[in-house]
Image (cartoon, helix red, strand yellow):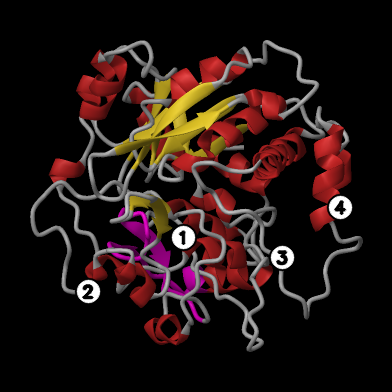
Amino acid sequence: MLNSALSYFPDQDAVTEILKRFYVENGKDKKRPYDDVPKLILKPTLFAQQMLIASTFVEVWLAKEGHSGQVGMNLLEKIQLAIPAQIFGAMLAGVDYLLIGAGIPAQVPRVINSIVNGQSLTMKIDVGDTNDKLVLNFNPAVINNVTYPLSRPRFLAIVSSHALVSYLNKDVETKPDGYVIEYHVAGGHNAPPRGKNSTNAFGEAVYSEADLPNLEKIRASGSPFWLAGGFGTPEKIKAAIELGAQGVQIGTLFALSNESGFSKEIRTEILASLDSGQLRVTTDAGASPTGFPFKVVHIDSTLSDINLFNQRTRKCDLGYLRTPFKRESGGIGYRCPAEPIDTFEFKKGVTEDAIHAKCLCNALMADIGLAQLRPDGRLELPLVTIGSDLDGAMDLVKIYADGWSAQEALNYLIGV
C-alpha cells in the first residue's frame, strides 16, 4: 500500500531517498525500535520537508483510494511548524477538506491560497508563552514535477465560540470556508473553560453555560457551520440541522468501529466497559503539552493510570508538540512540558506546566499499535481519547456487542 501510494508522488527522487533511509521490507523486527525521524524545526533540511510532505500525501492518497467519496484531513494549529508542509502534501493527493483547530487558524487561508499556485510563503510561529513571533519560511519548490494550480480544498476552522467566528470573518485573508462548532464534550483537545476556578480538585476542566457557543450569532454570521461534540445519535443530528447546521462531525462512533486505527485490545476493553456501563471519560486539564484540556479514557494499561504514568521514563524523541522559545543567548531552542522535567526547567519552562503533562506523541502512536520500544524492553503505553457523550456508542454496543463497522455506525445515524 505504501509503495503504491508513493508511486503517484510527483517527486520520485525524494521517494527514492525516503525508502532508502526508512523503508523495511515486510516490516521491522519487533525487537528493534523505530528509527528516529527529523524533528520539526524552524529551518528544516530539504529531506525533512520532503519526508513530511510525502507522508501526508500517502495518508490522504490511501484514504481516497477505492471510492469516489470526499476526504478531509484534521490538523492541529498547535503543531504550527508542520502546517504548510502538511497542507501541501494533502493538496498534492487531492484532499477535499482541511479542518484545523486547537488554536486560532487565522493564517491557514493565506497558506492554502499560496500553495494552490506554488508560491513561497511565510507563517508566523508562536514563541513559548510570550507575544513574540518567529517566521517559518516554506517554498513548495522543495518538491519537483508539480503541476500548478493545485485544486483548492475547502477549509473549515474548528472553533468553540461566536467570538472566534466574528474575528476570523473580519478579513478575507483569515476567513475560512466554514466552521466546525465544537462543544466541550468532544474528544481530543477542548477549548479551555472561560470561567474562573475552572479546574477541580482532580485536575479536571470544569465547564459551564459560559462555554456554550452562541448559535444565534453564529447563524447571523452567514458562514456555513457544522456541529461537533455530543451529536452522535440520529436525534442529535436532526436537532443540529434544525439549529441551522449543514451537518455534524462525529468521532467517537467511528473511532470505536472495527476499521479505526485503535488496536484490537484497546477497542475490546472500551466496548466491554461501555457494555457494563462502567466506562469513564474525563477532561484532563493538565494531560496535554499544548495546555489545552484533553479527553482521557480511563482503561487498564494506559497512561490514565497515575502509577503507570509515574513509572514512565520521560523522553521527547518525536517532538511534534515542541514549541520554540528564545534562549537567554538570543538563539532559538525547543521545549515540551512532557520532556524530562529537569530539562524543561533548564529551558526556562514553568514546572507546574510539566508535572502532569503526558507524552501525547508517543502515546497516540501506541494507540494504533506503533508503540516505540525502549532500551529496557518496555513499550510506550497508550493514552486513549474519545468524546464524553456516549449515548450513540451505548446504543450501538447494545446492538453489536462484539463491535461494529463504520458502515453499521453510519446506518444507525441515518436510520437505515
Q: How much space separates mark 1 and mark 4, taking CA atoms?
A: 35 Å
Magenta part of the chain: 273-300
The crowd level at tag 1 (other Cα within 10 Å; few <14, some 14-19, many 20+) is many
Sequence-wise first label, 2 or 1: 2
In the rendered structure, which amino acid carries the disc numbered 4?
Answer: Lys
Residue 296, percent from left and from top: 40, 65
Q: How much space separates mark 1 and mark 3, taking CA atoms?
A: 26 Å
Q: Which mark is residue 143?
A: none
Q: Disc 1 designates what residue?
A: 385
Sequence-wise first label, 1 or 3: 3
For the residue labelled by badge 1, is the local secondary structure a helix, a strand or a loop? loop
Q: Are marks 2 and 3 in contact (CB under 8 Å)?
A: no
For the residue labelled by badge 4, is the local secondary structure a helix, a strand or a loop? helix
Q: Is residue 272 left or right of residue 287?
A: right
In the rendered structure, which amino acid carries the disc numbered 3?
Answer: Asp
Sequence-wise first label, 3 or 4: 4
In the rendered structure, which amino acid carries the disc numbered 1?
Answer: Thr
Q: How much space separates mark 2 and mark 1, taking CA atoms?
A: 18 Å
Between 146 and 295, the residue placed more toward the observer is 146
Q: Disc 2 designates what residue?
A: 202
Q: Is residue 390 visible?
A: no
Q: Disc 3 designates what residue?
A: 35
In the rendered structure, which amino acid carries the disc numbered 2?
Answer: Phe
Residue 218, percent from left and from top: 26, 22
In the rendered image, which quarter contains the C terminus? top right
Q: How much space separates mark 4 and mark 2, taking CA atoms?
A: 48 Å
Q: Nearer the viewer, mark 1 or mark 3?
A: 3
Q: Are marks 1 and 3 in contact (CB under 8 Å)?
A: no
For the residue labelled by badge 2, is the local secondary structure a helix, a strand or a loop? loop
